[in-house]
Every structure is written in C-alpha cells, then in structure tokens.
Amino acid sequence: MRTTITADERDLIVYHYKRLLTAFRDAPQEERAALRKAYDYALAKYSDSKIETGEFYLAHTSSIASIVALEMELKIQSVIAALLQDIQTGNNNDLAEIKEIFGEDVALIVESLNKISALQTEKIANQSDHFIKYLLSIADDIRVILIRLADRLHYMRVLNALPEPFRIKISSETKNLYAPLAHRLGLYKIKTELEELSMKYGNPVAYFDILKKLEDTKAQQEKYIQEFIIPIKEELDILQFDYEIKWRTKAISSIFQKMKKQNVPFEEVFDLFAIRIILNSKNEDEKIDCWHVYSIVTNHYLPSLERMRDWITNPRENGYESLHATVLGPQKKWVEVQIRTKRMDDNAEKGMAAHWRYKESKKNKESDAWMQNIREMLEKESLGELGDAEGSKIDVKSDRIYVFTPQGDLIRLSVNATVLDFAFAVHSNIGSHCTGAKVNNQIVPLKHILKNGDQVAVLTSKIQKPNMDWLNWVNTTRAKAKVKRALKELEYKEAEEGRELLKRKVSQLKMVYSDELIQKLVSTFKLNTTLDLFQAIAKEKVTAIQIKDALITPQKTESKPPVKPVPPMKALATASSHLGKQKILIINDDPGIDHYKLASCCNPVFGDAIFGFVTISEGIKIHRTECPNARQLISRYGYRVVEARWLEAEAGQITVFTADILIQGIDQLGIVNQISQLISNEMQINIRSISMESKQNGRFEGKVKVTVQNTKHLDLLLTKLRNMDGVLKANWMHSSL
C-alpha cells in the first residue's frame, strides 16, 4: 500500500539535493544536470514507496548519496548509483534503461548493489572475512562496496524507528560485518559511528550506563586535560609551531571492550580520552616536526616505551600515519597523545579518499592502480584504508566463488565447482543422494558448473547412489574425497547385505557360521578378502546354490605350518600385500560414515599408524598398529585386515578425534579447576567428559575425555598437564579403563 509523500519528506529530499549541488558546485554543468536527471528518474521509479523504517525511498537514497558525496568524497557516478540503488534490476529493461540514460558504469554498480541486497547477512553474522570476500567477488568496482557501506551507515542512523528485535539483529550484523569493513577501508570515523550505534541498539543498558558516567565526569576530565596541555602549549608557542590541540573521549564501545578485556569497572579504565596535536607542516618537514613535538611531550611527561607507536617512519599498510605516545601525566594518570600533521589527520578521519586529494597527479592510470591497491588490501587479513575509488573497473581475479542455499547460507567453492561439489559441501548425505539442482530456479544436472552468486537448491532421491562417473563431475578436493568415501561406504553396505545373506544361507544349511567357514568360501571362489566374498554375494556373482555346493562338498585341504609371531608393522605390510586391488580405507570423523568404528582397546587418534579389521558382527574396527591386540589379529586373521589411513584435513579445516587421558596428582584445593582451565581456556580444547576421585593417600586420580586434532596436539596437552603444580602423571589411555 502506498501513501502520500509528506511535506517533511519533500523538504528532506530537497535538503539533500541542495547539499549535493553544493558539493558539486565546481563540477561541470553536465554533471549537475545528470544529478537533477537522476532525481527525476528516481522519483518516477520509487513513486511513494517506503522502506521498513517508514522512510520514503528517495529520502533514504538521498541520505545515502549525501554520505557518498560528502563523507566519502566520491564523484558523480557514485552519487547517481546511490540514488538509484533500490531500483530492482531483475527486469533487464530497467537495467538497459539506466545504462542508456546514465551510462554503463552506473548500471553495473546498481546491478551489483541489487545482488548484494539479496544476501541474507544473518547467515554469516560472524564471518566478516567471508562477507568481505563475497562483496569483492560480486563487485568488480570498489564503489559498490563503498555505497553499500554508506547505505548501512544511514540505516543505523534511522534504526530507532524499527522494533527492538529488528534493531538487535541489524546491530549485530553491523558490528560483525560492516564495522570491520569500514576499518579495513580506513574509514575510522564511520567505523566508530557504526560501533557506537551497534552498541546503543544492541546493548542499550551498558551503553547508556557508560554514557552517563562520561557525562558525570566530563567537567573533571576537561579540567585535567587543560592542566595536562598547558606546559606543552607554552613550549609550542615559543617555538612558533602552527598547531591545533584537540581531545576526545574514547568511544563508548571501545571503553566497554576495555572493561571486558581487562575485567575492570568503568572507574578503573585509565585511558578514557586521547589528546591529538595536529601540525600544519610542509610536506618535507612533516616527520621532523612530529618528532620534535614528541620530544617536547616526553620532556614534560614520562613515556611508556612499550606503548609507543611509530606509524610515521613505517606507516601502516593502509597508509595510516601518526605518532602515538602514552605518558604519565599529572596525578600519575596515563594519557594517550597522538601527534600528526593536518594531512595525516585528514587521511585518518576520512580514509584514503582524503589521502588521494594530496596526490599531485590524477591521471586515469594512477586511479586504476590505486583502486587495485584497495582491492588487494581488502583481500588481506591486515586492516586497510580507502582510496579515491572513482575510475574504471577493477579486474576480478579470484579462485573462489560464493553461492547460496535457498535459506541464504553462504557456501564458498573453488572456481569451476559443480552442483555435485555444492551438494557435498552442504553435507555428505545430501551429496550421496543428489540427483541434480535448481540453480536460480532452473533445473540443471549434477555436472552443471556454478557461477558466482548462484542460488542453489539441491534435488535428492532416496534411491540415488554414487557411481564412479561422479569422480569426473566434481572439481574440489573435498568433494572428490567425499565421493571416494561414499563409494567405499556403498561397497561396505553391499558387503553387509552379502554377509546377512550368507548367515541366512548357513543357518538354512544347519551349519555353524564361523571364521573357518568364511575362509573356506574365500578360498573356494578364489577371492582376496572377506569383503570381496560378501560383495560378490550381494551382487549375486556368488549364488546361494554355489555356496551350498561349496559347503557340502568335501574339499582337500593342505596342512599349513604353524604361524610364527610377526611384529605388527611387518605383519600389516604382509597382510596388505594380499589385498589385491582392495582400496585403502580412508578414516575421518564424518558422522555420515558409519561402516567403521574406532577400537576401544587402543583408542586411535589422528596421526597414529592404523589398520582396519573386519569383524564378524560389528563391521570394521580401526586399530593402532601398536595396539596390544594387533599382533594376534594380523597374524591369525590376515585375510580380514584392511589397509587404512587418516583423511588429511584441507587448508582451513580442522579434524578432531577423541582421546582419553588418565591424570594422577596431589589432591589440593582448586586442582580440578586448574586442569579444566588449562585444557579449555589455554589450549582451547573441548572437554567431552571429566571425572575425578580422591584417594586415601592424599592424592587423586581422574579421567578426562577430550577432542584433539592429532597426536602432536595430544602430546602438547600431556606435556602442559605434566608441568602443572600438583600433577604427578598425565598419560594417554590407549586402552579403555
């Protein structure tokens, strides 16, 4: 339902339009005319529709355009794209119309902004790196990201109009996704405002409590600062520096983080404000002047060398330049002093767009190179700054694509990934039963190659089974490994079916189902392993009649010499050599694979040398080659041994396994808490269970079950436990106790 535009809303639109005209007062007449044309076009397209906050669409986009022009200092194409960004471009006619009227750059920016708007950010609320990389993969023009950031800033400024649950959700997204993005772009003022508004709406009790305490102590702080700067001002005046001294209370969100990190109340946060000395120096004198002022400050107040930061000699990668000194002021209070020039301060306040204004040349080639630097900076883990983003497009070269589930979950895949890759990335079981997918509402086959931004709904069937062709239809390492494991799992399920058929047949023949009987059949049908026999029965390559004939027909047997004991590793190698074409069993912690179990007698973990043993009724059990039972199993039942190894984790993926630890020590107060703190907090290891028991001799004994990544991880934990005061022994329980 549409409503009439109010006089106030019209006034707001006119206000922003006049501000933009002022910003572009020195621009060519055609740019000012394009701005008016964009307003007329947007008014016709938006009509009188409103956004969730009740704000008229053009009033909303006008506010965003003002941020883009006045706070980010971008040029006319960015401003026009900001005005038109909420025009839906799903209709190709609209996109073509925008391109014809305003040019290709504006059309492409608007189209990319539409794609980003479709992202359900609540699904990646704690993945700022993925969010930033997704934006980069969608937007081949950095201006898209800046306009999106301006959009969120304005949204936060009018967030009070929304219900509380919505405010909390938007605040969380802003804190976790958009504030880090602003930080990387060097938009520190915008970053701080986003963090402040996020806390104001996300944690209002703490926010207003700190705000009140700051207001209550404001007069006291101002008096202290005047006392602090008097001797510095006197000396700067004598030396005839052209300077300005500013001070600011640190952001409420920053104070709150300090309180949490240091675990102290507001009254014990010592650096509540920062003093900034800004010099109006010539470019060639900047460093000398800053260091001169640093010497003046530290001559009057004792500096903390540990907290001194020199970002003038070595600027941050994002271009940030400043000298930071923390000194001991009057009343023995620590004060942070920032020393920089006007150029440096302008850069720090407004990002790299300000820095770009100081560039002597504004050639297009330089602009292109600068924009590429922005992209590279964003893609790195370190924090970055913003440049003047006006210019041609950025060449996108990425080995990753980002696609979505129908629920909006973000899935990152390698380039050329297929529907089958996507299905296995969602879950092994979904991948194993995948029959195809709907990509952007179009049904496509398993081997369809996905593109960046696709929405993918996997189609499955209970009767679908993996086959060898699938290995040619997946391109990611993870999916290939999962297909191989799915094929292996299918083989073992077939073997299980064959085993049950054999047991029923043996029962019908009134015979005893035993290892000797199974081995007789393996030998009769000239097979390599018990698994081969079971699979052959399931696939009807060995029939019930053949089994009957083999079991009731007497066969000549050759006497065999007694088996000599063989070391486990050598015996395993010998047994493995008889496996023929039997594939290696790949072991990991995938809950979707249930055809093997980790043997409780030795509790193998990732990194151990292992082998599989086919049991009669419990499937395959995985043992350590050093297991106490290994020698007997391998030497007596070599034909039931399966070669196995651990699945290597992909980059960025952590595989965990369970290990039991026996701890003995002196029964003293707090020892259990100390142990759990070491494991959980210091080592960041998950405790599955813990039990401790006091002994009569003043000692204790306990068992702790933990999840570790590998044996090296486990050894490190054991070493730290053994070095604890009060702990006498800490050993891995290879066998269950």
Image (tube, helix red, strand yellow):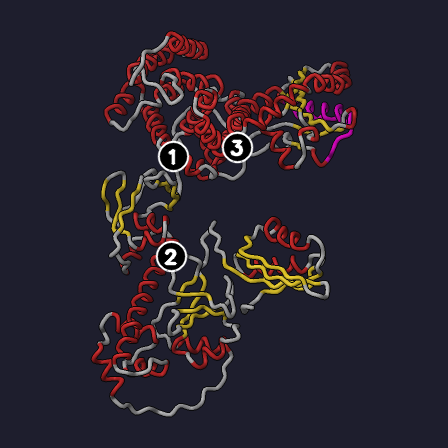
Q: Secondary structure at mark 2?
A: loop
Q: Is residue 648 above or below residue 231?
A: below
Rendered image quadrant of residue 593: bottom left
Q: Quadrant of residue 335?
A: top right
Instruction: Report the amino acid beneath label 2.
Output: Gly
On the image, numbered disc 2 is attached to which residue? 592
Between the C-alphas of marks 3 and 2, the distance is: 41 Å
Mark 1 residue type? Gln
Farthest left residue? 545
- Within-10-Å neighbours for mark 1: few <14, some 14–19, many 20+: some
Q: In what quadrant of the picture does the N terminus appear? A: top left
> Residue at 69% across / 25% down in the picture?
337
Residue on which the image places disc 1: 120
Q: Residue furthest front?
A: 696
Residue interval drawn in magenta: 284-305
Measured as percent of width and height from the top left, residue 98 is found at: 29, 21
Query: Which callout, 1 or 3, points at the residue further toward the start of the chain?
Result: 1
